[in-house]
Amino acid sequence: MVYSPGDACKRCQTPLEVSRSIFLRDEVSSFVTVLGASGAGKTVYLGLLLDMLSRGHGNLTGVPNGAFSVAVQQHTVAALEHRRFPEKTPNEADQWNWVHCETRDSRKPKTCVDLITPDLAGEAIAMEVENPGSNFTVASCLRSAGGIILLLDSQRVRDHGRGEDMFGIKVLTYLANIHQERRQPAKNKKQPPLFEIPLAIVFTKSDNCPEATESPREFIATNMPGTTQICRQKFARRSLFAASVVGSTMTTYDPTGASVEIPLHVQPHGIVEPFQWVMNSLNEK
Amino acid sequence: MIVEQAVFSSARSSQCQGYHLVARSVGIDEATAAVLTRWSPSVGGLIEGVDESLNWFPVNDQRVALSRSVFGGPEYSRRGGLQVVTNMIVCDRDSLAGYSQNPLALATVAMRNGGLLLQTGLKRRLETLELPDRTVLGSQQLNIDALASVNEVAQAVRFSGQVAVTGVRSPMRFLSDLSLELPEQDARRFSFTTGLAPAGQRPFSLYVYGHCSRATLDQLRSRKIRVIDLHQNVNV
C-alpha cells in the first residue's frame, strides 16, 4: 500500500504511520489513552509527559514515533517557556495532534507500552459518552485502549463536585460498557466480575488544591462519591494520583480585555507516575 | 413561517463545558442537535482574516440550516482568545419556495427580524422565530458580468464534489447568483460556507472565500478539494 506520511484513516483519523509501526513491530502492543473533560489539562499533561519520557525518567524512556508525535510536546513546552498555557484544543477530529510514544522500562527491556492517543477535545469525549457511537474517533481510541489515564481538574472537583462526579460516573460507565469482554472472573458468586483494564485517575492542577495532593483517596471519596463507588464496583486495577505542572499562576489580561491565566514557573509534579503505574499494571498481565 | 433557533458556542454550565449547543428552541430534537453540533466550528474554525461566516447545510431530507459564525466574547476558560459563536436557524425545505430557494435572501430576512445575530444574556431555551412566508429579495436577475464564473462553479459543484472558490469580491452576491444556476435536485444537497475552515466533519460542497491565505489553501489541497481562483481566473 502506498501512502504519504501525513495520511490518516478516513474513519477514525488515526495516522497511518501509527498503524504501520505497530504492525511492523514484532511485539505485543498495549495502548494507553489519556482523556478528560474540556479544561482538565490534557494537552499540558501529555506534552510534559512526552517531554519527560523522551529525556528519560527513572527506569522509563520514551521514543516518539514520527514527527507528528513531537507536535504536542513541542507546542506545550514552547507555550510554557513563553509563560502561557496552550490554546484550547479544537473539536474537529482532523485538527487533533496524535501522540505515539514507544516506552520501555529498563528493568523489562523486551516489553514495550505504546502511549497512543490523540490530544482529544474534551467536548468530543463528552459527546461520545452522552451519545455512544456519535464520535467514531473517540470510540475507537477508547475501545482499543489497554490502559486509561483519566484527568480531572482538582479545583473543579473541589468547587463543583457534583458536576464533576456526574462526568466521572458517565465516563466510567461508558468505559465499562465498551470493555465488557475484559472482565476477570468473579471471585465468588456474590461479587460481580471486575474489569481488568488499568485505570489511573489523576487530579490535575493540584498546585492550587493541596487536599488532592495530601490524600487523593479521601479527596475523591469526599467530592465524587458516585465515581468512587463505580470505581470500586467495576475496576479491579485502579489508582489515584495528583499532578501539577506549574508552581504558581497569576491572572492577567490580553489585548482584548479577556482574563488569561499564565504560569509563573514550571514545576512538574506527579506527571510520569500515573503512566508508570499503568505501564507496570500492563506488564504484570 | 416558523423557524427553529440554536446557538453553538463555548461556555461552562452545570451539564457541559467547552463548545456545545448552549441554547435551542423547542423544535430542535437530539438528532437535529447532533447535526448542528457537527457542522458548527469550535476554536480556530474561522479562516485567517475572516471574522464572519455564513453557512448553509442540510439537516436531513426535510430540513436545512442556515448559520452565521462570528467572534464573541473572551474564551471562558482563561486560555486567551475569543470564542466563536454560531447562531443558527432551521427550517423546512418546502418553506424556501417563497424565498426562491435562495439562502442569502433567507439570511437577510432572518437578520432583519433578529435572527442569526450575536446576543448577550442567552437563555438555554430559545423562542422560535417567525419570518414572512415570502420575500421579493429572492427574486433577482443574474449578474451578467459574473455569469461565466458562476457557470463554471455551478458545473464544478455538480460534477466535482467539493469545490473552493477564492478571490471572490462579494461572496454573498456570488452565492446568490449561483443559487439561480443550480438545478433544483443539486440545490437540495448543496451546502456552502463563506468563512469556515475545511474540516472532515463539515463536508461543505462549496467554500466561497474572498482572500485565502496560504495555510487555508494548503488545507484545501490536502483534502483534495478543487480550488478555483477567480482573482487569477485559474484552477489552482
Image: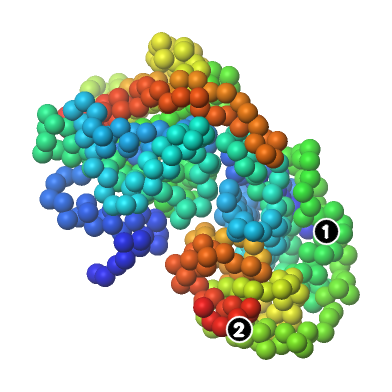
Instruction: Please give the name of the residue rendered at 58% of the width and 73% of the height, measured from the top-left corner.
Output: B164
Residue tagged 1: B111
Place of residue A70 in the rendered image (x, y in percent of width and height, measured from the top left): 34, 46
Return the residue nearer the eye: A247 or B73: A247
Q: Position of residue A259 (x, y in %)?
A: 65, 31
Question: SS class of the residue under badge 2?
Answer: loop
Label 1: few (<14), some (14–19) or many (≥20) C-alpha neighbours in 10 Å? few
- Residue B202 position within the rendered picture, expressed as x and y whole percent measured from the top left: 55, 61
- Disc 1 from disc 2: Cα separation: 33 Å
What residue sits 22% from the left and 51% below the top?
Answer: A22
Please name which of the two marks, 1 or 2, marks the residue nearer to the observer. 2
- Write down the chain letter for disc 1: B
Relative to A42, say whether B204 is above or below. Answer: below
Under circle 1, the secondary element is helix
Q: Is the residue A119 above or below the residue A186 in the image?
A: below
| Left or right: B196 as drawn, with respect to A205 | right
Tags 1 and 2 in contact by the CB under 8 Å rule? no
Where, by quadrant of the figure, is residue A46 drawn? top left
Give the residue displayed 21% in from the left and 35% down from the top. Answer: A61
Identify whether B2 is placed above or below A276.
Answer: below
What is the chain identity of the residue bearing mark 2? B
Callout 1 amino acid: Met
- Judge the density around disc 2: few (<14), some (14-19), many (≥20) Cα neighbours within 10 Å: few
Q: Which residue is mark 2?
A: B233
